[in-house]
Image (cartoon, coloured by chain):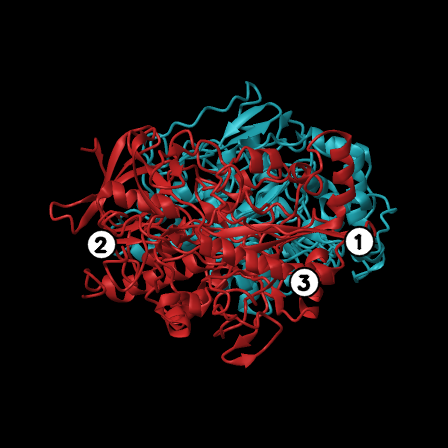
Amino acid sequence: MRQRKRVTAAALFGGLGISLAGLSAIVPTAHAQVPAPAASAPGTTGLVAQGEYVARASDCVACHTAPGGTPFAGGLSFALPMGTIYAPNITPDAQTGIGKYTEAEFARAVREGVRRDGASLYPAMPFPSYARMTDADIHALYVYFMQGVKPVANTVKASTIPWPLSMRWPLIGWRMMFAPSVKDAQAKSARPFADPVLARGAYLVEGPGHCGACHTPRAITMQEVALTSADGTRFLAGGGAVDGWIPTSLRGENRTGLGRWSEDDLVEFLKVGRIRRGSAFGGMSDAVGHGTQHLTDEDLHAIARYLKALPPDDTTQTPWTYDATLATALHSGDVSARGARTYVDSCAACHRTDGQAYPTVFPPLAGNPVVMDKVPDSLIHIVLTGDILRATHDAPSAFVMPGFADRLSDEKVADVVSFIRKAWGNNAAPVTAQDVARVRKALPKAEGDAALPLN
Amino acid sequence: MASIKMKSVDAVVIGGGWAGAILAKELTEAGQSVVMLERGADRSTASDGAYPGSIDELQANFRHKIFQNLSKSSVTIRNSSDQTALPYRQMAAFLPGEGVGGAGLHWSGVHFRMPPDDLIMRTKVKEKYGEKFIPEGMNLQDYGVTYDDLEPFFDKAEKVFGTSGEAYTVNGQVVGKGNFFAPSRSDNFPLPALKDVYGANMFRKAAEEVGFHPYAMPAANASAQYTNPYGVQMGPCNFCGYCSGYACYMYSKASPNVNILPALRNDPKFELRAESHVLRVELDSTKTKATGVTYLDRKGNEVFQPAELVIVSAFQFHNVHLMLLSGIGKPYDPVANEGVVGRNFVYQNVTTTTAWFDKSVYTNQFIGTGGGGVAFDDFNSENFDHGPLGFIGGSPVWVNQAGIKGIAAAKIGGPPGTPHWGSAWKKAMVDTYQHSVRMDAHGTNMAYRDVYLDLDPTWKDAYGLPMLRMTFDWKDNDIRMNRYVVSQIAKVTKAMGATDVHLGQRQPGEHFDTRFYQTTHLAGGAVMGDDPKTSALNRYLQSWDVSNVFVIGANAFPQGTGYNPTGMVAALAYWSAHHIRTTYLKNPGPLVQL
């Protein structure tokens, strides 16, 4: 279980001097399980279940659960340069949770980022996306939280941000400038789509799914530069680092986006986190784990079809095709290419000398969009720390990639990452030892054994 | 009385190895609530198989990281009834496991089906050679099940384990170059055979040349990535050789941990309690019904776990020990030749032959797969005429190169006669490690009236319980079998072009020596069969005396097999589970009426 969200960038908010650094870091990383709904009032069972589904689609559990804590009882920390904030308890406990919230107050908090007492929420809460959520979904969600979630008395630690930075009123300005009103957001969702499946996909991705929170670049003032596909091709074009992982483009780029993934690939990926083209890791592992794997096939197809309809932001990419030159060299014992020897020694057992690996157990590196991303940090990061492909309901095996931070110097990592980025038709730029040193320095603290899978 | 009493469950499973995991999976599928008690630690690839720390030969093979803690409990051993047994204090001749996965985590992965004739051995020997062929004092028995009974369960186990191999016949049709002597199968192996390593390939060619029938050994080391019927996945074997004694970091060696438990751990009907050491199965006043089990939890509390059904599925001799401690079945008395628990305790008759080659021949012994290799069965089971030879039993012969690692290689050094230290040792090791091939005669060991298990009258374990005593020695029949089969290996090593050969043969009159590793394939002691006078369990592995106790493991084998036992244990587990599910649960009671 990760200890806390990490600051990834620093920025100033307008002229008000309030740092909102790190607020982009809202990807769920806790591995909490959503509990079975508690007994509910007669007649609302269906609504509770519906609300639970909306909670899954919105991935509330991710941020509102402390490592090892009760789901929704809050406490996950977000470390910012000026202090640490903690996700609130959203169980229906009257004193420490949201038990006193009326549905209107609840709706306002979720969609507009305003607390019951009128204070602004930090935009770590993705209310600019949630603003799109329908009244029906908000109603179901409210019923679920009030009737399907057990109240837990848990007073979440107070923010450690010192005065005057702790004043929340400047956030009102941020909300006014960057967060859409519910009316505007819903009007945008009502824009015409070629078919209802695309419309449903747009709603899920742009609304409850808040995919853009990670996958859309942010401006210096920390708002996402686009909130819907109607706002231009920067939407979902790949975001800034979250916990040291670089969310890739979800658009149609051939090499670094989803250009070569089919709709079925995407559905399968969101369901089990592992397909012939790659496996989920970093924050996405968790997004699949407590979010997308629980969605219906219809909704997954809607999401996939919608994403497949997004044209590339970077239109300069030549189509990736497999190039066997370096694989052939490795087969014949030629390890003279930069990083080749390290690759053979430390990577090829699982990923093979031909880079095709053994999907869906060990993911391919040949043609993998993550590998070719302009920003090499994810690849460097995973070589240094390794990572875990988490079990899902339909794929109960987890797989652990070991980290090489203790075994490979910055130079060696740079060599092998450069090799991977160049081999098999991948054509991404090489990386330097300085790149590796920078990523190594910013690595999150290692997770404890408690997070290790049991297979 | 236990100080803590737990809520009753449908079934309690003792031991977290293959047998326990299979039974727990089958029972939860049947809707039963199951508690699995494992005395050792919980184990996983992520913790015990974390690369590269896990491939530490010293820790794994010499300090026995995932094996039984002998300072807490062990067995005592003697060669004959007139001796006083002494405790087995250091791991040597055999290596019992401990922890979740059990022997299924530390095993190599050799995954055989039992030869059909071995299951009906007494009948077969009588039929072919007459009853007088059976030596005095040999308890030759049938299993009470046939290959046809077990075939669907061999098949199921292979699919769960992701076993790699090449079939010879499927549904009576020859389909490949598998084992000529193997019985027909209902389906092919789920994965193709592993590639031959070089030494095994030399052996294959030579064996063919001299007229034997070599085949790729069936191995539960995945030859490709694989998803089993439970939806769990395996990675492909990379021939690193870190199989036996290790949690496989590639997820390619089948284990309960990788192949079954991922599908069980999230099941709300299943609970695994590691570090829970079972002391005994509790019986009611009639001694015909078990009420549950008493165990020590990790804090040392004595806990009673009530259950309707008790599955005893620890390692072979622990099962026998638990039956003796609990009063399940009549203990064996070798003098009166009565009683069944402890009777027909058997081992396996393994010797290793080494062939050395010219320095231009590189055998790369560091490469290996625990379960893979090339074998021939021309001298196994009833595949050859025992009549003129005058012994019962046989041996498959194989090159099962499981990766000879640094320390093991240094211990082997050079050919017999070379010093074990100094420059001569160094030179011999350098000259021979890369240029030698080792092959095993992996033979049967028959059951004898004066070879048995009982409770030691002297020694107690850390829990104050009498230790299990092994009375075991090699017998003339088995020594002669070994010598005959090994003599046949000489033909193969000659055809391989060996420059020097050391034939590993048992010597006449040789005694069992616990100081050197032989094999962990102990069997029998609570065997299955059709006659309660000669078996502790009926053909469904149900105790004849306590019908809600099933005892699953190699303890059920009436005599030693030439094959590795795990495939048979897994098939028996599925066989037993099938009959529990389809018959016993509907109407609990004895599944065999006398």
Amino acid, disc 1: Val
Q: Position of residue B398 (x, y in %)?
A: 61, 58
Density class for disc 1 (Cα within 10 Å; few <14, some 14-19, many ≥20) is some
Residue B548 marker: 2
Amino acid, disc 2: Asn
| Residue nearer the viewer, B540 or A23 | B540
Residue A295: in sight, yes or no? no
Chain where mark 2 sits: B
Q: Give the mark, 1 or 3, whose residue is nearer the N terminus.
A: 1
| Residue nearer the viewer, B56 or A192 | B56
Q: Are marks 3 and 2 on the same chain?
A: yes
Which residue is tagged 3?
Answer: B491
For the residues labelled 2 and 1, the Cα–Cα distance comes to 58 Å
Q: Does B328 sit left or right of A273 as displayed?
A: left
Residue B304 marker: none
Q: Position of residue B594 (x, y in %)?
A: 18, 66
Residue B361 marker: 1
Chain with colour cyan in the figure: A
Label 1 vs label 3, nearer the camera? 3
In the depicted structure, whether residue A173 falls above or below residue B17:
above
Q: Give the mark, 3 or 2, whose residue is nearer the N terminus.
A: 3
* Circle 3: element type: helix
| Residue nearer the viewer, B76 or A156 | B76
